Image (cartoon, rainbow, N blue to C red):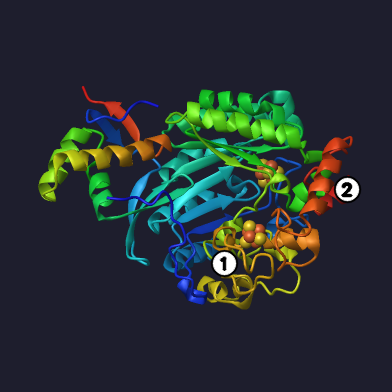
Amino acid sequence: MTAVTAASVPRLPRGVRLERDSARGIWLLLAPERIFELDQMAVAVIDEVDGISSIAAITRRLAQKYAASQARVEAEIIAMIERLVAQRVVDLQESA
Amino acid sequence: MSMQPELAQREPASRGPAYRPWGLLAELTHRCPLACPYCSNPLALVSKNEELDTETWLRVLTEAAALGVRQVHLSGGEPTTRSDIVEITAACRRLGLYSNLITSGVGAARAKLPALAEAGLDHVQLSLQGVNQTQADAVGGLAGSHQAKLAFAADVTACGLPLTLNAVIHRGNIHDTDAMIDFALRLGARRLEVAHTQFYGWALANRAALMPAREDVVTTIRRVQKAQVELKGRLAIDLVVPDYFARYPKACCGGWGRRLISVTPAGKVLPCHAAETIPGLTFFSCWERSLAEIWASPAFEAFRGTDWMQEPCRSCDRKEWDFGGCRCQAFALTGDAAATDPACSFSPEHARISALATQESTSAPPPYIPRRAAKDVVSA
Ligand code: SF4
Ligand code: SF4
């Protein structure tokens, strides 16, 4: 599997979408044969996944927004994206 | 920051309306150009004139969304046989429901694909009858079906839709899993399901012809697990192990009346698509009641939660994981729908079921009974 690094640019492919579940009051990532429940931070990450921003860029924005340490935020985003890439729910394109 | 790997049992351990279904299995029709011997459709197939009309399906989808359903599996039979499949798919998108087309890719599927993609279809799950034309056409019972399927798969990936390949494993193809994996990669599938035959409906009638040998099952599982690691990030492979050779049963439907609601082509609303095989339960039709009423009805309550369980399930610490296995299988193999699924090694019936599987898999296979509507059998 291609390594997920700070330079990786994640992208949601067709067939994967973020939806608010109003009946349950939670956020979901709907994907082929899978439903992921996202907490607030995971929703913030997925919201930033646009196929243009690298994980480094997403980290900068979120670390600032939540006043959290860059290193910690980056490690958590990489771990989360790795899990989704392994299941082919998120695609990677290396940044130019 | 945390992501649940998948929704576990979020719902509280209370009963009734506290549970909300996540998935709707919409069996739109039993009509299908193929005749796979492992088809899980019931032996008594619903005919075209008994099928629900478009308006009722649209109401069912609306009620399902309100009840908490997020994913709709458009299935059958061959769902693209329905003349309103595009309209139904568009309704899913309008209601915020994720739509999954479970198709053989033959018949009308290819011609309708562009309109389906346009209507907002989210995902295609394509069944695989074999890795080459001879095998596939023999299993599906239709000459040329393999070529049609290949063309369909190419169109799916060309229009950017995610493709999952579903291969049902049985005695006749258990040695082909490597080829299936290659095939999935070549077609550009993102996911592959290597699903050992589940013995319901026509598959149960064909069990002796389909039952694989235990050593082949073991080898296959090992190979697939190896491929899962090697292909991580390229192809996600889901493995469904065969019940009769398992140590623990599957959590059928994620637990009776917990996560799934199933609607038959004629409109019967069920906790599991095979539930009608269990006698003594009254299943209502969506003609007569709303989905919400049916979700709370006695048949859905019958095996909901864990209070109904007998030993050994009752005092087992896995009971919140597998919910005692499959009720339909428990009934089919023991005559008691509340018994422990004999797929479980703790079941007193397990040894008998294992011996039966071994005996069937080591005898000469009988010919397949192809899936046919009753009228075809009469005229044949
Ligand atoms: S298993 Fe085969 S016969 Fe049954 S619905 Fe699917 S394609 Fe048709
Ligand atoms: S005894 Fe019942 S609950 Fe325990 S593993 Fe077997 S089927 Fe599951």
Asked whether the residues under the numbered discs 1 and 2 touch, taking CB atoms below 8 Å apart as contact, a structural biologist would say no
Q: Which residue corresponds to the image point at 59% horizontal and 48% vertical from the top-left?
A: B79
Does residue B141 appear anywhere in the picture? no
Residue A81, label in figure: none
- Residue B20 location (% of width, % of height): 47, 67
In the displayed structure, would residue A23 be above or below residue A88?
below
Q: Which residue corresponds to the image point at 76% horizontal and 54% vertical from the top-left?
A: B350
- Residue B285 location (% of width, % of height): 63, 71
The amino acid pointed to by label 2 is Ser
Residue B379, label in figure: 2
Q: Nearer the viewer, mark 1 or mark 2?
A: 1
Q: Chain of mark 2?
A: B
Q: How packed is label 1: few (under 14 Cα within 10 Å), some, or many (20 or more)?
A: many
User: On the image, numbered disc 1 is attached to which residue?
Assistant: B257
The answer to whether residue B43 is left or right of residue B234 is: right
In the displayed structure, would residue B252 be above or below residue B181?
below
Q: Quadrant of residue B307?
A: bottom right
Ligand 1 placement by image quarter = top right
Q: Chain of mark 1?
A: B
The answer to whether residue B209 is left or right of residue A28 is: right
Report how far apart the C-alphas of labels 1 and 2 lie in the structure. Answer: 39 Å
The amino acid pointed to by label 1 is Gly
Q: Earlier in the sequence, mark 1 or mark 2?
A: 1
Helix, strand or loop for disc 1:
loop
Depth check: B342 or B99 in front?
Answer: B342
Placement of the C terminus of chain B among the 4 image quadrants:
top right
Depth check: B354 or B298 in front?
Answer: B354
Query: What count of labels does the image hold?
Result: 2
- Residue B237 location (% of width, % of height): 53, 35
Helix, strand or loop for disc 2:
helix
Q: Which residue corresponds to the image point at 39% horizontal and 39% vertical from the top-left?
A: A89
